[in-house]
Amino acid sequence: MTEAVLSAPVVKPAPDRERLAALGFVAPSVLIIAVVFVLPLALLLGVSVLDSKGGPTTAHYVRLLGTPYYLGVIWNSLRLGLLTTLIAFVISYPAAFALARARGPLRSALLATLFLPLAASVIVKAFAWTILLRSDGLINTVLIALGIIEDPIRMIFTQTALIIGAVNIFLPFMVLPIYAVVAQLDGRYAEAAATLGASPAVVFLRVILPLTLPGIIAGVALVFSLSVSAYVVPTLLIGEKYPTLATTIAKAYLLARDPGFGAAAGVVLLAIAVVVVALSTLLSREPK
Amino acid sequence: MSEAAPHLVISGVSKRYGAATVLERVDLTIRRGELVTLLGPSGCGKTTLLRAIAGLAPPDTGTIALAGRDVTHVPPHRRNVGVVFQNYALFPHLTVAGNVAFGLKVRGTPKAEIDLAVRRALALVKLGHLGGRRISALSGGQQQRVALARAIAVEPDVLLFDEALSALDRKLREEMQVELRRLLQEVKATAIFVTHDQDEALTMSDRVAVMNKGRIEQLAAPRELYARPASLFALNFVGLSTRIAGQVVGAQDGMVEVVTPVGRLSARGAFQPGASVIVATRPEQLRLGADAGANSAAGRVRSVVFQGSRTLVDVDAGAGASLLAELSGREAEVPRVHDEVRFAWPVAETFAFAAEAAP
């Protein structure tokens, strides 16, 4: 057997002409990526280090990273991203298993409840939450009608409202990648682990969790980068009280006409997202 | 514990899934160190029985005792069994050594002991040099060996193989059959194989349990199973045979006289006159020419298939009956297609089975 492997013909490296041809084929996509992604990023970076007269400056970054107010803004964004991701994960992980175990019409119905909201605009969904949560909204009206409370509970424009809305809106982006992995998971891994002496808890920790990690990481990366940069959700559900990087960028461009500062905030937001994605890639790497 | 003591005792085990009965009051006793195959077509219940032994599918009724302990309702992780799954179910997130170490790690075995056991198990399956490899970097045959090493490393009371060789190609499978049997005997393992491959069953096992419709039809050593099939099903499932339908006209001392389209035949079997039976014999029992005191039948040769050490001759004996003869390479005379021939075979190697039991 070993001899057969050793005597197998060695694949020859492609000659230079073939390499050139291959390069020719990838050139268009490289060009598109350069124009659509790299160029705007370069512009953003460039603008972030220019002052209003066009001279080089680090003032925008100093202001952003040196002022307690803006550090608070960065923390607000991070907090929104982390809380939303954590809560979405806690809900999504068991949900993905339920979805994968469901059969027939139930599975279709469950998948539809995940997919259909994606068809509605995020603005519509955020407004729907304001209708539900405001003082004369559906929830308060029902609770008062039932005599459970006398005065309306303050829900809209609180952090609770913000997190509830963000979790609801970004939930599919956590459930679906985990579901995709769980649905492919061979039940025999768990059986093999059990016959080898692993209790159900150990099977979960040492087999199920590591094998579903790629889905978890994809979900976490998606939901974190979506919620950390969310603009509509905090604007509609909590407003001025909870400034985030996204709302700060909008203000810098639209109200203050300060593109340099807006760009710097954009770069910081981007850096946060890149760090998260890089960490995810690192974590999902298979053992050698 | 003595070598002959019962090691695995299955008694009255039944299992149903909805309306379908998958196992019907199965009894099976296996001695320590014995290699037993559950052989049968798909849906015969062999895999369900294996899963019941592993604890993955507890039986509805009946008991299973392993190494002197009733394990009927013991969950799989407290049974100390080793299972080699059909597609191996090796953990893709662990290395080869990580897979083999898994069972010992979850048992809380000290690290030094684990390392030693892993090295020993991998050496046993001749994969000592691949401990650091990823599972996806292994060939099918190597994965098979890792699965075996993983199951053996925990020193289980019984090793269970669920169609473990069926994913390998024919040549590798045949090599593995011989090697696996030698290896299991070397470590004195008690093992149960599930397979639908009769060659695998005959090669690997001390005893074979032929299963059909949730029951064990026959439990016998391979040689006995082949030479003395207990039922038409066992006859059909293991080896080739000549089968001719007929009616019993006389019975005496465990022998019957049967009238068939090819003539009057004598066979072993206990039936009342008038019973419909199938008379059968193995192809290597047939010899060219007539022989007084033996069964014989004539016909026209339909096909001759040369298979190296043997030649298979298919004879049309008329009235829908056919004879299958196996002639060894040493025989000088081999008939040709369309030849008129007569074959004879010993009465003692002729069996009668109830016709209605035909599958």
Image: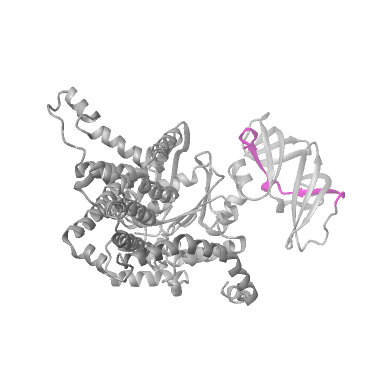
Q: Identify the residue at horizontal 21%, vertical 38% (top origin).
A: A156
Asked if residue A217 can be seen in this view, the reply is yes
Residue at the outermost front position: A53
Image check: B192 left or right of A240?
A: right
Q: Identify the residue at horizontal 19%, vertical 42% (top origin).
A: A158
- The quadrant of the rendering that contains the C terminus of chain A is bottom left
Residue A222 percent location from the top left of the image: 36, 53
Residue B343 percent location from the top left of the image: 79, 49
Near-viewer residue (A283 or B263): A283
Q: Identify the residue at horizontal 46%, vertical 31% (top origin).
A: B19
Q: Identify the residue at horizontal 67%, vertical 47% (top origin).
A: B348
Image check: A52 left or right of B97?
A: left
Near-viewer residue (B345 or B238): B238
Could you say which quadrant of the image residue B260 lies in?
Answer: top right
Could you say which quadrant of the image residue A161 lies in?
Answer: top left
Part of the protein shown in magenta? B337-359
Near-viewer residue (B53 or B162): B162
- The quadrant of the rendering that contains the N terminus of chain A is bottom right
Residue B315 percent location from the top left of the image: 80, 47
Residue A240 percent location from the top left of the image: 21, 46
Colouring scheme, one of rainbow, by chain, secondary structure, one colour: one colour
Q: Is residue A29 above or below residue B54?
A: below
Near-viewer residue (B290 or B213): B213
Asked if residue B99 can be seen in this view, the reply is no
Q: Is residue A175 above or below residue B81?
A: above
In the image, residue B182 lies in the stretch drawn in magenta: no
Numbered circles on residues, count? 0
Residue at the outermost right position: B339
In the image, residue B351 lies in the stretch drawn in magenta: yes
